[in-house]
Amino acid sequence: MSKEDFARDAATELARAAPPISVGAYTLAGFTLNEWVTIATFFYVVAQLAFLIYRWRRIPKKVQKEGNSE
């Protein structure tokens, strides 16, 4: 068996295994891709809310400091 035959056979077998591998990869830790997107969106929204609250609390303190220095 030459290297070319081996490479061709390996590529063929990889192509045959691709659909089950992709389905298995989309089911990580028992969650489907749909559920992972939902979880990621939840954490993104929480991070955005935390940053917004931080900015809202920081702005009045900054304005208050500027007002006292004048």
Image (cartoon, rainbow, N blue to C red):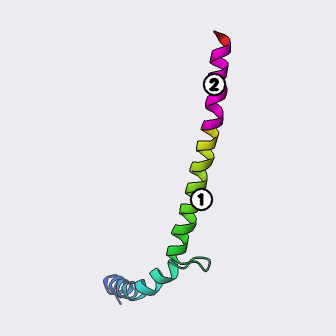
Left or right side of 20 for 38:
right
Mark 1, residues whose alpha carbon is within 10 Å: few (<14), some, or many (≥20)? Answer: few
| Nearer the observer, 38 or 20 | 38
Residue sitting at x 66%, y 22%: 64
Residue occupied by mark 2: 62
Residue 40 drawn at (x, y percent): 55, 63
Residue sitting at x 66%, y 35%: 57
Q: Which quadrant does the C terminus fall into?
A: top right
The image quadrant that residue 56 belongs to is: top right
| Nearer the observer, 30 or 34 | 34
Residue 30 lies in magenta, yes or no?
A: no
Of helix, strand and loop, which one carries label 2?
Answer: helix
Of helix, strand and loop, which one carries label 1?
Answer: helix
Q: Main secondary structure of the magenta part?
A: helix
Residue sitting at x 47%, y 83%: 23
Magenta span: 56-68
Left or right side of 12 for 33:
right
Query: Which label number is shown at residue 43?
Result: 1
Q: What is the spatial separation of the Cα atoms under label 2 and label 1, in whole angstroms? A: 28 Å
Left or right side of 53 for 2:
left
In the rendered image, the vertical position of residue 70 relative to residue 10, given as above or below: above
In the rendered image, the vertical position of residue 28 relative to residue 40, given as above or below: below
The image quadrant that residue 68 belongs to is: top right
Residue sitting at x 67%, y 27%: 61
Residue 1 drawn at (x, y percent): 36, 90
Query: Which label number is shown at residue 10?
Result: none
In the rendered image, the vertical position of residue 31 relative to residue 46, given as above or below: below
Amino acid at pointer 2: Lys
Sequence-earlier tag: 2 or 1: 1
